[in-house]
Image (tube, rainbow, N blue to C red):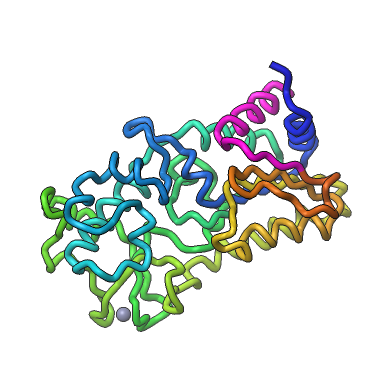
Amino acid sequence: MTDSPSIVTASKWLTQSSSILVAAGAGLSASAISRKYNVGLDYTSSVAFDRLYPRMLQVSTMRCMYDAIGKHDWSPKLMWGYLFTHVNLARYNWGETDVYQDLKRIVRHIPDSFVVTTNADGMFEQNGFDMQRFLSTQGDYSLLQCLKPCSSQAVFDAREYMDRALPYVDPKTFEVPSKFIPKCPRCGSDMFYCVRGGDWFLESAFDDQRRRYRDFLNRSVNKGRGGLLTIVEIGVGFNTPSVLRWPMEELVTNHDNVRLIRINMHAPDVPTNVRNRAVAFGGDAASIIQRLSEIVSNSS
Ligand SMILES: [Zn+2]
């Protein structure tokens, strides 16, 4: 099989790069096929939801995982029964997947690297990426926080709350007894995952990650070193374009040592003014990343 011109260009940039920035959105995890369930972590898919949580179709109005976001017509017992179950699976037990492992192989061939993602699912951690080179912009399902919030310190490891509750989630009703619904240990208020769901979000929990991201950008776009920075943006659409999509376009527009590889099934367009420094792929992320990983691995 002959590689497309875009694949040739993208792999050439990658092998020449001194640094790589992976910018990942929901589309990447959607193509991360679970070896156990044989579906991707696709929040909009009714097929995936039915495969993972068939019982939820009976006891709730949910039809896909995305329906849980901002959902109000369920009891706290059902909400936490579902959320604990879902986070336990998606954040901790999805396991290694081909697309993330191929991506990791690419990253390892490039001297300096960083990952920035809007996904709170911990997939990069589950696939063994370096968490010192990682920013989760929208929070992380491994943390709970006070909804008040009573303090900037009111952020807690979700694991222990989940482990206590999971054995008591009723498999028929998906409900968890009230005593396992998490309350803030400091003030007793309701808690939720530490994710950008409202102005209560304690973003300060991610200050260290954000500082390391800024440091990476400072050194990798610094043209004095003569290095090339390639951005591999995967599955970043128009849900929250100001978080990743537009900033990536800005980086390639403003710095002529930056290249952009955009992989997006639904919106692969790149700005016309940077067409010589950007390539776009509209197909399935998993197969494109697999091919790039093969070429980059064989080049050294
Ligand atoms: Zn509190």
118, 279: nearer the viewer? 279
Residue 281: name its quadrant.
top right
- Give how far across and how far down residue 62 sits, in percent: 28, 56
Residue 280 lies in the magenta stretch = yes
Image quarter where the C terminus lies is top right
- Give how far across and how far down residue 103 sits, in percent: 58, 36
In the image, which residues are magenta?
Answer: 279-300
Which residue is depicted at the point 59% across and 43% down? 265
Quadrant of ligand 1: it is bottom left
103, 244: nearer the viewer? 244
User: Residue 158 vs residue 286: left or right?
Assistant: left
In the picture as drawn, the residue positioned furthest to the top comes out as 1
Which residue is depicted at the point 42% across and 52% down? 121
Q: Is residue 58 above or below residue 98?
A: below
User: Residue 24 vs residue 172: left or right?
Assistant: right
User: Residue 126 vs residue 108: left or right?
Assistant: left
Residue 123 visible within the image: yes
Which residue is depicted at the point 70% across and 56% down? 248
Residue 228: name its quadrant.
top right
Q: Main secondary structure of the magenta part?
A: helix
Residue 113 visible within the image: no
Q: Is residue 256 above or below residue 12?
A: below
Image quarter where the N terminus lies is top right
- Give how far across and how far down residue 45 sits, in percent: 39, 46
- Give how far across and how far down residue 267 sits, in percent: 63, 49
Residue 201 lies in the magenta stretch = no
Which residue is depicted at the point 58% across and 37% down? 285
Q: Is residue 152 above or below residue 4?
A: below
